Amino acid sequence: YDLGSGFGKSVVLAGLLGLNATGVELVEQRWQGACAALRRASSGASGLQPGQVRMVKGDIIQFDFSDADLVFTDSLAFGDDLMEKFNQAARRMRNGTQIISA
């Protein structure tokens, strides 16, 4: 999962590397851009399988990512309140889940 995935570059790259990936973005313009990037990457012989990569428009705190193996997020953009809510949500993840935060 890429929480706050912006224009979806990391999510599309993960898919092109053969991983299942989900990007979650709240800002409409960025989510639309991520969906466009996914359409471009899915056309042709990219090797992306249907459903392998998803772009979800939503709030990362409301989104259930408890089944994640890996979570990437740019937490430098988070205020204290959002960071605390993210920490609470992260506690629901299964053991062994890795979080990469820039």
Image (tube, helix red, strand yellow):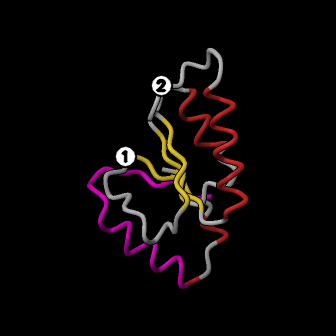
Disc 2 marks a residue whose amino acid type is Gln
Name, please, the residue furthest toward the bottom. Answer: 81
Q: Position of residue 71 (x, y in %)?
A: 47, 52
* Badge 2 density bin: few <14, some 14–19, many ≥20, Cα 10 Å: few
Q: Quadrant of residue 41?
A: top right
Q: Is residue 93 magenta?
A: yes
Q: Position of residue 89 (x, y in %)?
A: 38, 70
Name, please, the residue furthest toward the left. Answer: 95
Q: Position of residue 61 (x, y in %)?
A: 46, 71
Image quarter in which the C terminus is found: bottom right
Question: Circle 1 sits in a helix, a strand or a loop, which is it?
Answer: loop
> Are discs 1 and 2 less than 8 Å apart at CB?
no
Q: Is residue 54 above or below residue 81?
A: above
Q: Which residues are magenta?
A: 81-102
Going from N to C along the chain, the mark reached first, 1 or 2, is: 2
Name the residue carrying label 1: 69
Report the front residue among 93 and 42. Answer: 42
Name the residue carrying label 2: 49
Gap in Å between the C-alphas at discs 1 and 2? 19 Å
Q: Is residue 28 above or below residue 5?
A: below
For the point 31% across and 60% down, which residue is it? 93
Q: Position of residue 70 (x, y in %)?
A: 43, 47
For the point 61% across and 34% down, which residue is it? 13
Dot in front, 1 or 2: 2
Q: Seen in the image, is 56 located left or right of residue 37?
A: left
For the point 37% across and 46% down, which residue is it? 69
* Badge 1 density bin: few <14, some 14–19, many ≥20, Cα 10 Å: some
Q: Which numbered circle lies on residue 88?
A: none
Q: Seen in the image, is 68 located left or right of residue 40?
A: left
Question: Circle 2 sits in a helix, a strand or a loop, which is it?
Answer: loop
Q: Seen in the image, is 59 located left or right of residue 92?
A: right
Q: Total label count?
A: 2
